[in-house]
């Protein structure tokens, strides 16, 4: 990715308890993004949130399974993002609960690769 390049930011909002086969949705999507050659992905753990159901979810220290909001964010070229969306769309359509996918134009201000130690 180059500086001043126009790219897309894809955000996928799911729950920490959502699963695809035997993996959490956020893990499955992040691993698939890596396999698909996308520039990078970040998974954010929400503190509190609610969706279309209006059911409020937040972290409670006494619960065994936390049901909290998760956001997967991916930034890359538009064609790569669109290809990835086409690949994962059926996975997300099959979820028993809701989710949200957004995509917006983004301008890369700085894309600096860190030093790789060998």
Image (cartoon, rainbow, N blue to C red):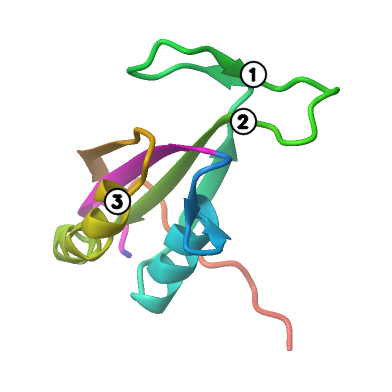
Between discs 2 and 3, the one toward the N terminus: 2
Between discs 3 and 1, the one toward the N terminus: 1
Q: Are marks 3 and 1 in contact (CB under 8 Å)?
A: no
Query: Taking 83 as reference, is 76 left or right?
Result: right
Front one among 115 and 14 = 14
User: Local crowd at mark 1 within 10 Å, few (<14), some, or many (≥20)?
Assistant: some
Between discs 1 and 2, the one toward the N terminus: 1
Q: Residue at x 22, y 40 (%)?
A: 103
According to the picture, the residue beneath numbered tag 3 turns out to be: 94
**Would you identify the image quadrant in which residue 13 lies?**
top left
Query: Taking 7 as reference, is 12 left or right?
Result: right
According to the picture, the residue beneath numbered tag 1 turns out to be: 58
Q: Position of residue 60 (x, y in %)?
A: 77, 20
Q: Position of residue 11 (x, y in %)?
A: 35, 41
Q: CA distance from mark 2 to mark 3?
A: 19 Å
Would you say residue 112 is visible in this rendering? Answer: no
According to the picture, the residue beneath numbered tag 2 turns out to be: 67
Name the secondary structure under disc 3. Answer: loop
The magenta segment: 2-15
């Amino acid at each position: 990715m180059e500086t001043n390049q126009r790219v897309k930011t894809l955000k996928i909002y799911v729950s920490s308890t959502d699963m695809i086969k035997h993996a959490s949705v956020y893990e499955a999507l992040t691993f698939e993004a890596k396999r698909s050659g996308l520039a990078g992905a970040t998974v954010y753990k929400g503190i509190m949130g609610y969706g279309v159901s209006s059911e409020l979810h937040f972290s409670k220290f006494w619960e065994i399974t936390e049901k909290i909001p998760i956001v997967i964010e991916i930034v890359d070229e538009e064609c790569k993002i669109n290809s990835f969306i086409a690949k994962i769309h059926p996975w997300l359509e099959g979820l028993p609960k809701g989710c949200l996918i957004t995509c917006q134009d983004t301008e890369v201000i700085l894309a600096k690769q860190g030093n790789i130690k060998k």
